[in-house]
């Protein structure tokens, strides 16, 4: 069942990337592209609303305000749909970069250090702590850098060029960065401090939904 869920998630991500690219380059029905683009935003807003003290009321307010904003903004969005996808790409990267960066502040545990503890509960070695802190910083810089590249391309390059980078290459770039980090880890950390991919996947499944960045260092 898990394999089928993962395959479905990958297929949906690929369809999203293709749809976003077509929309950003002006191919296909514009209203459908706008609807596809705003759906994740609306879903995220509703999830946040359900975390508030009065979830039912908050969700109703979010739904009402979102519907009003869309009704007013829809004519403008029909002529600027690329802006919608750019802001999504920029916002996601900056939010993740901030998540990694904030965990480097004094009194917090770096995101990658917290992930390492999920895989192997217990104290981390001094070498592992140094390495995972460095990787956390590397992820923050990579995400911020990719957001900067996206912004420069959006401002100065044709929409087709920006869209290839933002919608089609972002996923592979994240994958390449992750694989490079794994190769570095093989050279930097001793075998006892290097979890297998299976261990990482098992820990991720067990700890799904947790926010490591919010953990305080004991």
Image (spheres, rainbow, N blue to C red):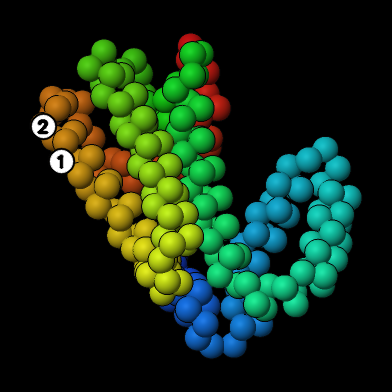
Marks 1/2: CA–CA distance: 7 Å
Residue drawn at x 36%, y 31% is: 136
**Residue 160, how many percent across, how many down?**
41, 74
**Residue 5, how many percent across, how many down?**
43, 64
Q: Is residue 107 above or below residue 171?
A: above
From the image, which quarter does the N terminus lie in?
A: bottom left
Comparing 26 with 99, the one in front is 26
Question: Is 174 on the left or on the right of 40, as rendered?
Answer: left
Comparing 183 with 168, the one in front is 168
**Residue 201, how many percent across, how many down?**
33, 46
The answer to whether any part of residue 115 appears in the image is no
**Residue sitting farthest toward the bottom:** 28
Comparing 159 with 217, the one in front is 159
Q: Tell me the element at label 1.
A: helix
Q: Few, some or many C-alpha atoms within 10 Å of disc 1 (few <14, some 14-19, many ≥20)?
A: few
Q: How many marks?
A: 2
Question: Is 120 on the left or on the right of 192, as rendered?
Answer: right
Query: In this figure, which residue is indicated by the disc labeled 2?
Result: 187
Classify residue 143 by image quadrant.
Answer: top left
Classify residue 181 by image quadrant.
Answer: top left
Residue drawn at x 27%, y 46% is: 178
Residue drawn at x 51%, y 13% is: 107
Question: Is 174 on the left or on the right of 189, as rendered?
Answer: right
Q: Is residue 28 above or below residue 114?
A: below
Comparing 65 with 6, the one in front is 65
Query: In this figure, which residue is indicated by the disc labeled 1?
Result: 183
Question: Is 98 on the left or on the right of 110, as rendered?
Answer: right
Q: Few, some or many C-alpha atoms within 10 Å of disc 2 (few <14, some 14-19, many ≥20)?
A: few
The answer to whether any part of residue 79 appears in the image is yes
* Mark sitting on residue 141: none
Disc 1 to disc 2: CB gap under 8 Å: yes
Classify residue 182 by image quadrant.
Answer: top left
């Amino acid at each position: 069942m898990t394999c089928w869920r993962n395959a479905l998630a990958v297929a949906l991500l690929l369809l999203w990337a293709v749809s976003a690219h077509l929309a950003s380059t002006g191919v296909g029905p514009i209203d459908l592209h706008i609807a596809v683009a705003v759906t994740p935003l609306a879903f995220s807003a509703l999830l946040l609303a359900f975390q508030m003290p009065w979830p039912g009321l908050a969700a109703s307010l979010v739904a009402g305000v979102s519907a009003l904003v869309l009704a007013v903004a829809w004519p403008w969005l029909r002529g600027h749909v690329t802006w919608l996808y750019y802001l999504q790409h920029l916002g996601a990267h900056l939010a993740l970069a901030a998540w990694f960066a904030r965990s480097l502040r004094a009194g917090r545990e770096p995101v990658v250090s917290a992930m390492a503890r999920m895989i192997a509960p217990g104290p981390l070695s001094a070498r592992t702590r140094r390495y995972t802190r460095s990787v956390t910083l590397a992820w923050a810089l990579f995400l911020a850098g990719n957001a900067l590249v996206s912004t420069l391309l959006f401002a100065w390059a044709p929409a087709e060029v920006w869209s290839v980078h933002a919608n089609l290459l972002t996923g592979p770039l994240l994958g390449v960065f992750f694989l490079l980090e794994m190769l570095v880890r093989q050279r930097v950390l001793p075998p006892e401090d290097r979890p297998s991919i299976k261990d990482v996947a098992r820990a991720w499944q067990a700890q799904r939904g947790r926010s490591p960045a919010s953990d305080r260092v004991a």
